[in-house]
Amino acid sequence: MIQKRVCILTLSVGSGHLRAAEVVESALYDGMDPIEVTLLDALESARPWFHWLYVDPYWWMLRHAPWLWRRLFERRQRQLHQATAPDWVFRRGCREVLRQIKKHAPHLVIVTEIGAAEIAALGRREGWFNAPILAVQTDFQTEPPWVQSEIDLYCVASDEARGQLIGWGVLPNRVLLSGIPVDPAFALSFDRADLIKALGLDGRRPVVLVMGGGMGPVPLDKIVAGLDLCGVPMQVLAVAGHDRKLRRRLELLRRRVTLDLHPLGWTDNVPELMAVADLLITKPGGLTAAEALAAGLPMILTHPIPGPEERHVRYLEQKGVALHAERPGDLPGLASRLLAAPQELQEMRRRARESSRPGAAHAIAQAARALLEKATYIDLLATPPPGTGESAYLM
């Protein structure tokens, strides 16, 4: 039996793309043997100038000129740009990752980010590998540069994304509505009483989870200070992630607020935190939103990245699973209103679970298996039998 080799390629502009890649990797190992999976982050081996030319301007715009990023994003959508950067930027800036893919000689390449999709398409087009490409999208809508003729199959998060790709010329049978791949743990039925006890919380007071996501600066300390104005005796779990300065600011704030604040750093227990929470306040990243849907957790959305995450806000509002705080000052009022309306929260929970696709990762793994079976069969036919110089196909 041929050992199937899979390369998962991402470009970690945001943490969600890497999380999606890891979840897909886990799902592949769950259902396929023998298999060898290599996860590559293009940024880890990219040349330094690729960072300042391709990545750094994006972060600068998000922090200092979000209006400019919105304008560029909308122009890309309107004019149906076929690339986020010229081919030479990826060819020269990411040459090492192309070498790594060639060395791995995969039977299948899976991509979880738009730039990674362009790198993979370029690599196949220019002969670095000859394997099918499976594109996994982590947004509820999509963008024109995803449309690459070298991509064999798209796994998308929504009917809207599917319709967009088909409208841009992708054949309908090449687009699978799978959902965004999330850890299946988000859909588990935890014992909430046990979680409350384990986290040192009070079961008589509501729990609000505050997260900033992995992309763009979100002032969690200011959000918590605003919640303190609600007058609701809530408990707040504030996840600062890898931002140590923010974690310190939250620790200092803990001494000044009247609410029960629990500052947290990086944690792998987000499924448990979502299971114990009554309400999530977050930036609307695709992965975080999909995880909250799987957990049946109502959301208040704040600080969206101009363009893609603003579309997430509209999508989630239309589903009836989230409210949008257009201004930071709107947060206390929205939180107070929802926490005082248990029936509305319950209905939002129902809609969230109804809209979720917690089995997305395994649906994607199943699609990957189908592509792999085809690819390894062709590879077997093309391999000369021992002692011959001819392919099996020619015999």
Image: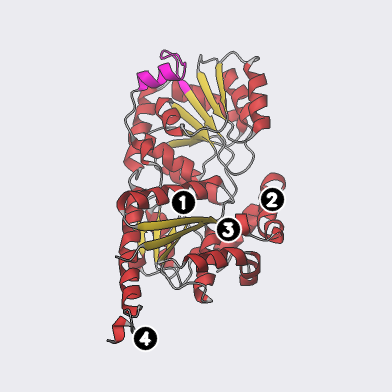
Disc 1 target residue: 21
Query: What SS does tag 3 mark?
Result: helix
Q: Residues within 10 Å of mark 3 (few under 14, many from 20)?
A: many
Q: Quadrant of residue 220?
A: top right
Disc 2 target residue: 61
Marks 3 and 4, how far apart at CA: 37 Å
Marks 2 and 4, how far apart at CA: 57 Å
* Residue type at the position of mark 1: Ala
Query: What SS does tag 1 mark?
Result: helix
Q: Are marks 4 and 1 in contact (CB under 8 Å)?
A: no
Query: N-terminal of the two: label 4 or label 1?
Result: 1
Marks 1 and 3, how far apart at CA: 12 Å
Q: What is the quadrant of the N terminus in the image?
A: bottom left
Query: N-terminal of the two: label 3 or label 4?
Result: 3
Q: Are marks 2 and 4 in contact (CB under 8 Å)?
A: no
Expressed as whole percent of the image width and height from the top left, the position of residue 146 reads 49, 63
**Mark 1 vs mark 2: in front:** 1
Q: Name the residue rendered at 61%, 64% in the picture.
A: 96
The one of 73 and 54 positioned closer to us in this rendering: 54
Magenta extent? 192-207
Residue found at the very far front of the displayed protein: 387
Q: What is the quadrant of the C terminus in the image?
A: bottom left
Marks 2 and 3, how far apart at CA: 21 Å
**Residue 178, visible in the rendered structure:** no
Disc 3 target residue: 42
Expressed as whole percent of the image width and height from the top left, the position of residue 42 reads 58, 58
Marks 4 and 1, how far apart at CA: 39 Å
